[in-house]
Amino acid sequence: MKYVFFLYIMTISLSFLGQKDFDQMVKGLISKDVPVLTVESLNKSISNGDVVVLLDAREPKEFTVSHLENALNCGYKSFDADALAGVKKSAPVVVYCSVGYRSDQIAAKLIKLGYTNVHNLYGGIFDWVNTGYPVFNENGKTNQIHGYDKNWGKWLIAGEKVFK
């Protein structure tokens, strides 16, 4: 019994340390210029029926594997602000990518373009999936998530990683 309890405590400790490392990595990548929103806060807003424009700053091949439900893809390398055509500059916009770096950059561009209610999703789609929230593709809900590459994919602890 003591052995089982020890293993349980070790599992919790490793899980906590992994999240601590993840948080440290994310904080090192994002600027202080763009407000952040946690995955829990975003999920609560969506669950409450709040209208939020979700903007995926990953590349189209990543978006195709899976994305947050009803998200629009704007890309990163070939950023296309036209993805927000028809969206009021005052509308709540949450930008996300894998962990938060690319979305931070795109959110800063949107603020420069005059959007006034823009947030970066802290921890990105990886934190969203790791927390247990759903992702979708053209066929509906999926367990697949693009891991970007093997180095970044290590932060994805839930879902089925795809690297295509």
Image (cartoon, rainbow, N blue to C red):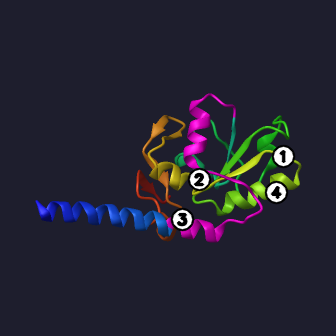
Spatial CA span between label 1 and label 3: 26 Å
Q: Which residue is mark 3?
A: 23
Q: Which mark is residue 61?
A: 2
| Mark closer to the chain start, 2 or 4 | 2
Spatial CA span between label 2 and label 4: 22 Å
Q: Nearer the viewer, mark 2 or mark 3?
A: 3
Q: Give the amino acid at mark 2.
A: Lys
Residue at left 64%, top 40%? 71
Outermost residue, left direction? 1
Q: Residues within 10 Å of mark 2 (few under 14, many from 20)?
A: few
Q: Nearer the viewer, mark 2 or mark 4?
A: 4
Does residue 8 appear to the left or right of 131 in the view shown?
Answer: left
Q: Image quadrant for the N terminus?
A: bottom left
SS at mark 4 in the image: helix
Q: Residues within 10 Å of mark 4 (few under 14, many from 20)?
A: some
SS at mark 3 in the image: helix
Spatial CA span between label 4 and label 1: 11 Å
Q: Which residue is mark 4?
A: 109
Q: Give the amino acid at mark 1.
A: Thr
Residue at left 51%, top 66%? 22
Query: Where is 152 relative to 67, above or below?
Result: below
| Mark closer to the chain start, 3 or 4 | 3
Relative image position of residue 64 (x, y in whole percent): 57, 46
| Mark closer to the chain start, 1 or 2 | 2
Q: Residues within 10 Å of mark 1 (few under 14, many from 20)?
A: some
Q: How many marks?
A: 4
Q: Give the amino acid at mark 3.
A: Asp
